[in-house]
Amino acid sequence: MIRLIDVVKEYPNGIRALNGLNLELKDGEFAFMVGPSGSGKSTVIKLLTGEVAPTAGRVMVNGFSLSNISEWQIPYLRRTVGVIFQDFRLIANKSVFDNMVFAMRAVGASPKEIRKRIPYVLKLVGLENKQSRLPDELSGGEQQRVAIARALLNNPSTIIADEPTGNLDPARSYEIMTLLGRINELGTTVLVVTHERDLVNRFGKRVVMLESGRVISDGVGRYEVKIHA
């Protein structure tokens, strides 16, 4: 479960990114987070992954309290949260399979775990026949599926996707969002941060809208307000 209670985040330069934000995401939910540039979306992601700490309020993620988490606990938190980025962040000179191996070795996975888990996640995202390809031999949609597979390697309970379709055409964007929906149906909590209004409206999921560091609307339905990148 994700819970933010009266969260304030002020950066050292004096910018206040969050102003008493409240949000709860139950286990197994799927939600979109939307809002204009500067509304606080990126700061929410940084809080949920332990990259920054709140100035005030409480942040709880999968049993961890981010308000007073110890440094040694952060790697354990991050094993419960898989993050997908807009720019894929794949290692260009490593094959799809070796990108997966690198990610699993980074968290101390055993050779047995690597042999078992990688084929499973690549099959889940439909890339079982592309594991020997280099990233630049794949389409943009395929590269994003590799990034999704990498985020799933540690069997996280939560996936956070930060503008996962920002570099893709509409057809590939729909494909990636459908894949995230399938992953959610398997029990994984999914939070998608996006500015793509049409894509949000097409899926009819929960939509959390931020503005000026606060939640200004939250519910299932269409998002009619124009979003600025």
Image (cartoon, grey):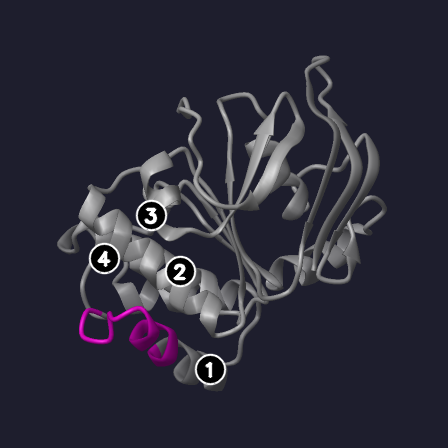
Distance between the alpha carbons at the discs numbered 3 and 4: 22 Å
Residue in the image at 81% along x and 50% along y: 69
Magenta stretch containing residue 205, yes or no? no
* Residue bearing the label numbered 3: 202
Q: Earlier in the sequence, mark 3 or mark 1?
A: 1
Tell me whether circle 4 and circle 2 mark residues in contact (CB < 8 Å).
no
Q: Secondary structure at mark 1?
A: helix
Distance between the alpha carbons at the discs numbered 4 and 1: 26 Å
Residue 180: which numbered mark, if any? 2
Q: At label 2, which amino acid type do we have?
A: Leu
Foreground: disc 2 or disc 1: 2
Figure quadrant of residue 114? bottom left
Q: Could you tell me residue 89's position as x and y percent?
A: 37, 46
Magenta stretch: give its range. Answer: 119-130
Q: Earlier in the sequence, mark 3 or mark 4?
A: 4
Q: Earlier in the sequence, mark 4 or mark 2?
A: 4
Foreground pick, 88 / 229: 229
Q: Callout 1: few (<14), some (14-19), or many (20+) C-alpha neighbours within 10 Å?
A: few
Q: Could you tell me residue 38's position as x and y percent?
A: 55, 21
Q: Callout 3: few (<14), some (14-19), or many (20+) C-alpha neighbours within 10 Å?
A: few
Foreground pick, 92 / 86: 86
Q: At label 4, which amino acid type do we have?
A: Glu
